[in-house]
Amino acid sequence: MNSVLTTLPGARAAARRRDQIEDQLGAHNYHPLDVVIARGSGVWVYDVDGRKYLDCLSAYSAVNQGHCHPRILAAMVEQAQTLTLTSRAFRHDQMAPFYEDLARLTGAHKILPMNSGAEAVETAIKAVRKWGYEVRGVPQDQAEIIVCANNFHGRTLGIVGFSTDPDAYGSYGPFAPGFKIVPFGDFDAFDAAITPNTVAFLVEPIQGEAGVVMPPAGYFTRVRQRCTERGITLILDEIQTGLGRTGKLLAEEHEGIEADVTLIGKALSGGFYPVSAVLSNADVLGVFQPGQHGSTFGGNPLACAVARAALQVLTDEGMIENAAAVGAYFLERLRTLPGPVREVRGRGLMLAVELEPDAGGARRFSERLQARGMLVKDTHGHTLRLSPPLIVTREQVDWACDQLAAVLSAA
């Protein structure tokens, strides 16, 4: 293949070359900001020219513990020098300690480790359908799962089939049947969608990708009660909201409920390695028998060792409590921002600033913030998502709010 690369003086040439390589060889499935990150430490990342940025995305909450946390790094290096992969064809010495640590922390009765968040979602869908047929007695191939509009559970073919985002599902059909879509936070709509064939309700405690959309107070309490009454499995996708992001270990704790199936990922490895897990009561995951579901890399020794360290630093270093306290302070500060702010919302360190529709879109503000040393993610046209690592300080929040105020005042 002929090169299309050009030669420009010095660092500018190198930057242009990188961009051209990405555009030429990479599939255009992302639209990143024009920054090339080369290093990270704590809440900070540094580009290839050494410029410093406050990371207010945390890799979509995968880096809750901060970039390159030394304890997680040490656990990864130690395990990588010993044993990385056996596949589940054999037992290994890291699996039982991982199960024990996760069960002790979350109260899970059964655990199935996978790799990505999307794999965890797909696993849960398979499990609750099988449970519906074999335990609930739903007629074969008639199981129904209720989901919410504006959901984001991943990008596999099975998942995008029940998305309401045209960018997610457009031109990928035909899709698997068996899903009913209701408005998020509308209990009456959820209740009306239930039939004798409903086996599960799959929902995010807070809709992250949709723009940090919050449910009404008491919504999940009512949902939990109805699921119990009707024998429906409540699946909470805590891949973004879980592991401290909202100021609790799991977001379900804010309403004092327990899901039947909980999905975690992202921060389960502190950003070092793809690790996810399906947590459930004994009934749901108990339907799987050997050979019916699996993954070559799921639950490998390296993943288990890294995840154990990632969980330990969350609790040992008070990160969850910090997310609650500093998150509340951050939310208070955001509510004083000037400029075209329509709404501020969130919980813990999962926050969003929604701008007025006539503000010109959130992307331009994220670009201006980048120029001031702060990285945020725009979503759904008019919303800025703010999710720094859980170790962020009040002083760093003050600095971030100063940058936000400056760019919004200049709108």
Image (spheres, grey):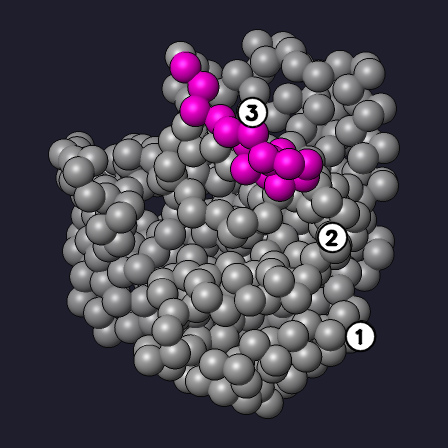
- In the rendered view, tell whether residue 411 sits above or below residue 100: below
* Disc ID at residue 51: 2
According to the picture, the residue beneath numbered tag 1 turns out to be 395
Binning the other alpha carbons within 10 Å of mark 3 as few (below 14), some (14 to 19) or many (20 upward) gives many
First-in-chain label (3 vs 2): 2
Stretch in magenta = 2-18
Q: Position of residue 106 (x, y in %)?
A: 64, 50
Q: Quadrant of the N terminus?
A: top left
Q: Residue at x 76, y 70 (%)?
A: 396
Choose top left, top right, bottom left or bottom right for residue 214: bottom left
Residue 16 painted magenta: yes
Q: Amino acid at mark 1?
A: Glu
Q: Is residue 383 visible?
A: yes
Secondary structure of the residue carrying numbered label 1: helix
Secondary structure of the residue carrying numbered label 2: loop
Q: How many marks?
A: 3
According to the picture, the residue beneath numbered tag 3 turns out to be 298
- Foreground tag (2 vs 1): 2
Q: Is residue 122 visible?
A: no
- Foreground tag (3 vs 2): 2
Asked if the residue at tag 3 contacts the one at tag 1, i.e. Cβ–Cβ closer than 8 Å, the answer is no
Binning the other alpha carbons within 10 Å of mark 1 as few (below 14), some (14 to 19) or many (20 upward) gives few
Q: Position of residue 409 (x, y in %)?
A: 55, 85
First-in-chain label (1 vs 3): 3
